[in-house]
Image (tube, rainbow, N blue to C red):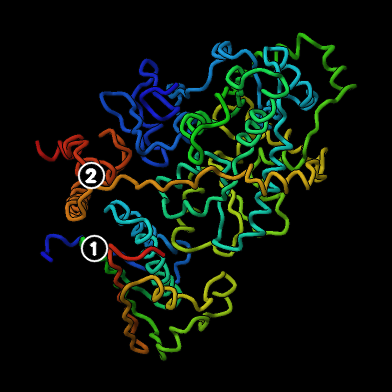
Amino acid sequence: MTEALVFRQEFAVKGGDFTHAGEVACEIKNLLKELGLSPFVVRRASISAYEAEMNAIMYAWRGRLVLSVTPRRIRIIVEDSGPGIEDIDLAMREGWSTATPEMREMGFGAGMGLSNIKKNTDQFRIKSKVGRGTRLEMMILTNGREP
Amino acid sequence: MNGETPHSLSVNDEKCLGCVYCLTACPTKAIRIKGGKARILDNLCIDCGECMRFCPRDAIESRTTSFSDLGAFKYKVAIPATVLYGQFDNSVQPGEILFALRRIGFDYVYEISTICELNNAAIEKYLNSHPDPRPLISSTCPVVVRLVQRRFPALCGLIAPIEPPREIAAKILRANLPRVLKIPSSDIGILHITPCSAKMVSINRPATMEKSYLDGAISIRDIYKPILQAIRQNQEDTIMCHLFPEILLSGIGMGTALSGGETRGLKNHRTVAVSGVRDTIRVLNQVEIGLLKDVDLLECTVCPDGCVGGPLAVENRFLAKSRIQHLVDKLGDRTVVDGSDISLLYHRDFLSFHHPVQPMRPPALDSDPGQAIRKAKRRSRLVQKLPGKDCGACGAPDCRTLADDVVRGLAELTDCPFVKEEKK
């Protein structure tokens, strides 16, 4: 794929900023629609972006989301500086969450985030260093399946 | 009525000054100022009527059925929206308003609050028998249906497939009047009386059936004066309406003129009611990124406070709301529609959509994916060159939209007065 055919945009995510939660995911959603992608592929990508955005808002201090799109695939990378994840296998499990009671009260932290991302992406990689931060890399094929 | 534009809203060039009120008010960025006049972009307009509300010169007009068009029908039937009752002082009872409609030329007037209750009960039945997906979205507001089709196509499958009360009412009349009156169906004109600028569009181009059961929509603005005159001139009707109340009203149905009215009847379900076009878009955005899954029914009405805030209503919506609330309180929560009738109609599919709401792709930057990416990249660069003042002087509502128009070939970067200055 030639470099010219990659659309790339970066977004900042601020830890603890619940008032603007979901705005990055919405912006990505609208961008992908403008690129003419299938509504169902757009929906899967935006659900994944939202879950990743929320994780960074809930747990990290700051983070950034990088969207890159080629005619074949959507790649979303979310890197944060934060506490990191101790046991990734456990975190991937449905229903597992380390959310505080306050977060749960706000309706977050049902422990579905990472497993939801896995469900909605065609490729999902996660790397984390305790005390440093987490990096999620998600890939969705533009001709991918419907949900 | 099948004119070149599929929309009900149009600009009266004689009144339009080319100011920026409608430009910035439009929630889908469907207006541009070209040649000093506002232009509505067909593929983006959802007929919400926000431009009408904000235009200080009344230059945006809504195409509805005019009173004089009624002559085309031998037998004229009116189905007034319950919002109409809120346009008159509470001393004027619904029965008198319906009677006045007969006085001004309708042969038959069909009261819709019972059908609103029927619709509500059908939605409840549907929710009970379909545990997912969630949240379902009510189909009553025609703008919401259009908005979902165009801006949120992936959500089309969430629209609860029960026809709105106006279509159910017209369908009932179509099924029965020709038989009872012994006249051909084509001689009967069924007209909805409405505060809504989008009903005409939903009648001319229905989203869930081949042909609407309604023949047109009359604006409350147009019919208000004749009704008022008929009431004033025929004071004796008042006594008759009081002594012979021949209509059955439903409190549950009446309440659907207000935001939260549909959800109020669904006591055993988790519901959310949203009103106003911007908040509706915000909430639909949340649904699209996977939220609100614990909500059974999402009631969205794009007019503020619900249909009562429709752009073609006459009375200010706060007063109208209070009057309708007064009627709702008086009528109470008692159901007036027979449960077995509801079951029968529901199971016969009499109340359901003929076909599902079809998703429509929003206009992409380019039909070729590679080309679309190139244009998106160019647009990002153009946005950097623009001042970010979102002043509207170029004719687009904001700088990003100008950049978007430029890459789509609809505008020039030099339309921006600030870019020009830099060049000099």
- The spot of residue A44 in percent (x, y) is 38, 65
Q: Position of residue A71 (x, y in %)?
A: 21, 60
For label 1, the residue is A69
Q: Residues within 10 Å of mark 1 (few under 14, many from 20)?
A: many
In the depicted view, which residue is nearer to us: B211 or B374? B211
Q: Are marks 2 and 1 in contact (CB under 8 Å)?
A: no
Question: For the residue marked with disc 1, what is the amino acid?
Answer: Val
Query: At x 30% / y 44%, what residue is drawn?
Result: B363
Residue B70 image offset from top left, x and y in percent: 58, 14
Whether residue B384 can be seen here: no
Residue A45, position in %: x, y?
A: 35, 65
Same chain, marks 2 and 1? Answer: no
Q: Is A32 located above or below residue A78 in the figure? A: above
Q: Dot 2 corresponds to which residue?
A: B403
Give the number of marks. 2
Chain containing the residue with disc 2? B
Task: Say left or right for B114 vs B407.
Answer: right
Say which residue appears at 50% left-offset and 39% top-offset.
B143
Chain letter for mark 1, please.
A
Q: Name the secondary structure under disc 1.
A: strand
Q: Quadrant of residue B232?
A: top right
